[in-house]
Image (cartoon, rainbow, N blue to C red):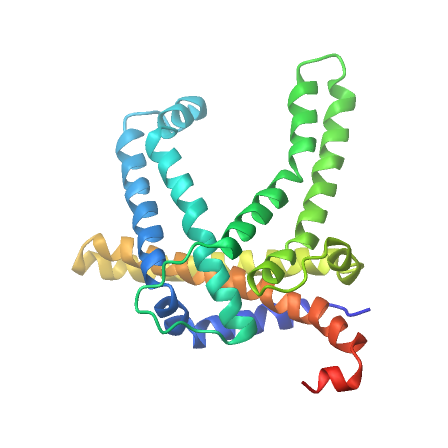
């Protein structure tokens, strides 16, 4: 059984994202620009909407924040993200590029990627529902710990089954049982890789924010918007790269090891 190298996975993902950042953005620059622009505009809209609201009044902030703009950005993200992620997975795992200057492809492959992503996000819903429904009843002392257990279990399965996404993107066999077998004993390693990535991105964000703040004093606040957008794209490339490396090390390596020598040679 293959064991995931947490540090090696994250290190390789960052090195690859850094060295191929330009190529990966060039591959899907159009949906990336639309995706980033929509989120930047939404962020600026939220600042104006919540400007006069006490930040400690969380309920009021949430009510003001959620509107047609938030719904539109969410729907746009659901459409654009599969286009971007599928192209990046195929670049990392297959070396596939596009000769088209304007890559905007949402087909059967992207639709399957979207449906798989939605399925993975639903795995934590049962635990959340148990906690919400049972919180205001006499069974709250029982419902809350049970809900937490279900949430943790759902998250663990979601992390393991997230390796279905590279399989869908590369038109490989989509076998949940095989993915679970390949990730058996690697739950903490998979979580550790994602956690290490979050920590690294936070450190990078702090450094970049300081540099952007200094430059913005001279060139204006637009630099902050551009810098934040670039950092966001870099973080998205990292997340795709980590999944791709995990898929290669845990799933493809076992499939190759199980294949006959004459099959491996082709």
Q: Please report the residue visible at 31 percent of the width from the left and 57 percent of the height from the top.
A: 33
* 104 sits left or right of 220 in the view: right
Q: Position of residue 174 (x, y in %)?
A: 67, 58
Which of the image's four quarters has the N terminus? bottom right
> Foreground: 233 or 75?
75
Q: Quadrant of residue 265?
A: bottom right
Residue, far front: 108
Q: Position of residue 266 (x, y in %)?
A: 67, 85
Q: Position of residue 110 (x, y in %)?
A: 50, 54
Q: Position of residue 98 (x, y in %)?
A: 40, 71
Q: Please report the residue visible at 64 percent of the width from the left and 23 percent of the height from the top.
A: 132
> Foreground: 257 or 110?
110
Q: Is residue 121 above or below residue 140?
A: below
> Foreground: 225 or 109?
109
* 19 sits left or right of 266 in the view: left
Q: Is residue 57 above or below residue 185?
A: above
Q: Quadrant of residue 195?
A: bottom right
- Count every numbered label the image shows and give the total: 0
Q: Please report the residue visible at 73 percent of the width from the left and 19 percent of the height from the top.
A: 140
């Amino acid at each position: 059984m293959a064991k995931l190298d947490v540090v090696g996975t994250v290190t390789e993902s960052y090195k690859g994202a850094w060295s191929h950042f330009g190529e990966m953005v060039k591959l899907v620059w159009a949906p990336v620009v639309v995706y980033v622009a929509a989120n930047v505009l939404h962020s600026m809209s939220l600042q104006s909407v919540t400007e006069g609201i006490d930040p400690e009044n969380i309920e009021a902030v949430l009510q003001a924040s959620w509107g047609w703009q938030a719904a539109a950005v969410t729907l746009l993200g659901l459409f654009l993200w599969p286009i971007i992620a599928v192209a990046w997975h195929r670049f990392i795992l297959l070396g596939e590029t596009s000769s088209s200057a304007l890559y905007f492809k949402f087909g059967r492959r992207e639709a399957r990627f979207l449906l798989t992503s939605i399925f993975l996000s639903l795995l934590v819903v049962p635990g959340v529902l148990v906690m919400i429904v049972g919180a205001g009843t006499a069974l709250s002392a029982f419902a809350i710990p049970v809900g937490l257990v279900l949430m943790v279990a759902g998250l663990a399965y979601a992390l393991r089954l997230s390796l279905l996404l590279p399989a869908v993107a590369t038109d490989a066999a989509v076998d949940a049982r095989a993915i679970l077998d390949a990730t058996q004993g690697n739950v903490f390693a998979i979580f550790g890789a994602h956690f290490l990535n979050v920590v690294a991105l936070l450190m990078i964000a702090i450094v970049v924010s300081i540099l952007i703040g200094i430059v913005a004093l001279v060139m204006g606040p637009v630099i902050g918007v551009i810098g934040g957008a670039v950092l966001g794209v870099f973080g998205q490339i990292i997340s795709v790269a980590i999944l791709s490396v995990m898929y290669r090390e845990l799933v493809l390596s076992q499939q190759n090891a199980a294949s006959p020598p004459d099959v491996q040679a082709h």
